[in-house]
């Protein structure tokens, strides 16, 4: 990433105040912070993941909280050996027994030489205030992608949620290497210093043609997230179709391991909130009683939490002309309302939008044709400024993370928005910053140049 591109980006953006955490070229991908493959939804540990070339596995990860002693984390290795991509080892180490909210320092050594270092904030407790950031539709290799990454890093969130379409346009290993990891690890160490969670998008896992794209579906090989979702199986319903030469398919399944297809849907807890992450791709049948029961039960188990959030890629509610047909996830809107969900975060549409609180009301149980209509009951009294208690579920489109923006001409034409849309910002890339302190939720939408373009508050 050193040559100058048409947009003027050389790939050498350094965020002021942050020093690169990569001290050697020996790493293919520097450490990045993940939830890990835990089966429960709880907190208390994270995973660090890094990539090395085959034959370079002799790295040692040490970590400590500030003021504590260094401990050594023993990693597990996963060999990624698929056609068209160089063999690599993805190493994952679990960092456990972390004090809530503590600053955690880590160092990665090879043959006695430090090759990477960094720090992050351990998951916080339910009594601690915290901040998270949200954006998606990012991995195109652009200047605005770098700006959003740098802006999110400067905001110092405790964790980050990506709303899918991590890389364009086939979710390939080669695309991660060129358009994703250089923007979030190393020189722009967002994922190296912030716990990061992602929902899968269509550009990530919809295309399972391993004859055309043998290094595709890298989401299942590179991310380390909970495996507590529905009991889906390869080749079964509501799972992306994987096809191609038998050798290619076998190589992918060895590389993905148990992540495929379980990691497409999962849940986790953070502080006083519960998160449900879903696969919204069109092959998923959200009328399936088993899938609906999993969502309902997952939200039911979260009733002890103050806040409940959902993240997936394809929005059910938005006002853009692009992807106007994207309404399938309205099929589970009733589950979100019954489960007490506060906010649903989506991507897919490359801009920022937020809805009025939507009430399913009489639309529960009606035919799908009725769900496609836009006349949903709304709580229009809620404005997030003077009226901060709502009735219904808020839907936020956070798809302005770096890819080309959709329908900016509609921003000044509120009369053409759907009746459920409250705000529409499409002339600049942006990301959400959310601060939660007990029963108060504050969202600020920040553009690529650091300007606040929206602000609203929820209280309970």
Image (cartoon, grey):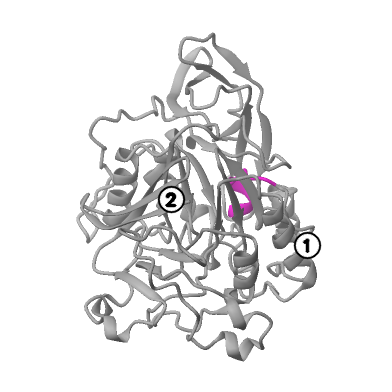
Mark earlier in primary sequence (1, 2): 2
Q: Is residue 99 left or right of residue 409?
A: right
Crowding near pointer 1: few (<14 within 10 Å), some, many (20+)?
A: some
Tell me the SS state at disc 1. Answer: loop
Task: Judge from the rendering whether residue 57 lies leftward or rightward of residue 383; answer left or right.
Answer: right
- What numbered label is drawn on residue 234? 1
Q: Position of residue 403 (x, y in %)?
A: 36, 64
Q: Nearer the viewer, residue 286 or 421?
A: 421
Q: Is residue 98 left or right of residue 288?
A: left
Q: Nearer the viewer, residue 276 or 321?
A: 276
Label 2, secondary structure: give it.
helix
In the image, residue 422 above or below residue 9? below
Q: Looking at the image, which residue sits at the far bottom? A: 369
Relative to 40, is 173 on the left or the right?
left
Above or below for 379 versus 171? below
Q: Name above or below for residue 333 compared with residue 136.
A: below
Is any part of residue 416 visible from this angle? yes
Tell me where residue 8 appears, x and y as whole percent.
Answer: 19, 55
The magenta stretch spans residue 176: no
Callout 2 environment at 10 Å: few (<14), some (14 to 19), or many (20+)? Answer: many
In the image, 334 versus 69, the foreground residue is: 334
Q: Is residue 252 shown to the viewer in this render?
A: no
- Magenta residues span 218-226
Q: Residue at x 76, y 64 (%)?
A: 293
Frontmost residue, 109 versus 388 = 388
Q: Quadrant of residue 17?
A: top left
Residue highlighted by disc 2? 180
């Amino acid at each position: 990433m050193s040559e100058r591109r048409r947009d003027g980006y050389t790939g050498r953006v350094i965020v002021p105040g942050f020093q690169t955490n990569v001290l050697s070229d020996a790493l293919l991908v520097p450490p990045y912070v993940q939830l890990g493959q835990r089966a429960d939804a709880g907190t208390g540990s994270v995973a660090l993941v890094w990539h090395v070339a085959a034959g370079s596995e002799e790295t040692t990860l040490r970590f400590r909280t500030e003021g504590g002693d260094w401990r050594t984390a023993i990693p597990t290795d996963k060999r990624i050996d698929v056609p068209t991509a160089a063999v690599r080892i993805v190493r994952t180490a679990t960092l456990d027994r972390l004090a809530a909210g503590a600053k955690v320092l880590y160092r990665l050594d090879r043959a006695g030489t430090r090759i990477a270092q960094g720090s992050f904030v351990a998951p916080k407790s339910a009594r601690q205030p915290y901040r998270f950031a949200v954006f998606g539709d990012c991995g195109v290799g652009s200047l605005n992608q770098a700006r959003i990454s740098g802006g999110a890093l400067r905001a110092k969130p405790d964790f980050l949620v990506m709303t899918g379409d991590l890389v364009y346009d086939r979710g390939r290993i080669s695309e991660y290497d060129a358009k994703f990891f250089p923007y979030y690890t190393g020189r722009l160490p967002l994922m190296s210093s912030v716990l990061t969670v992602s929902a899968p998008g269509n550009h990530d896992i919809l295309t399972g043609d391993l004859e055309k794209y043998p290094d595709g579906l890298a989401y299942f090989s590179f991310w380390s997230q909970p495996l507590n979702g529905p009991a889906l199986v390869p080749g079964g319903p509501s799972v992306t179709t994987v096809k191609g030469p038998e050798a290619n398919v076998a190589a992918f399944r060895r590389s993905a391991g148990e992540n495929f297809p379980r990691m497409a849907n999962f849940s986790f807890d953070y502080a006083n909130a519960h998160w449900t992450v879903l696969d919204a791709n069109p092959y998923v049948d959200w009328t399936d009683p088993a899938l609906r029961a999993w969502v309902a039960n997952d939200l039911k188990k979260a009733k002890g939490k103050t806040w409940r959030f959902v993240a997936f890629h394809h929005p059910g509610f938005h006002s853009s002309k692009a992807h106007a047909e994207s309404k399938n996830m309205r099929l589970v809107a009733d589950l979100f309302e019954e489960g007490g969900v506060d906010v649903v975060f989506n991507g897919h549409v490359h801009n920022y939008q937020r809805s009025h609180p939507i009430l399913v009301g009489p639309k529960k149980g009606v035919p799908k044709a009725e769900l496609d209509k836009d006349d949903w009951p709304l709580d229009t009294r809620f404005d997030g400024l003077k009226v901060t208690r709502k009735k219904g579920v808020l839907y936020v489109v956070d798809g302005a993370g770096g890819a080309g923006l959709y329908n900016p001409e509609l921003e000044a034409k509120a009369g053409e928005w759907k009746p459920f849309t409250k705000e529409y910002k499409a002339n600049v890339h942006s990301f959400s910053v959310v601060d939660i302190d007990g029963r108060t939720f504050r969202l600020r939408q920040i553009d690529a140049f650091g300007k606040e373009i929206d602000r609203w508050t929820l209280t309970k």
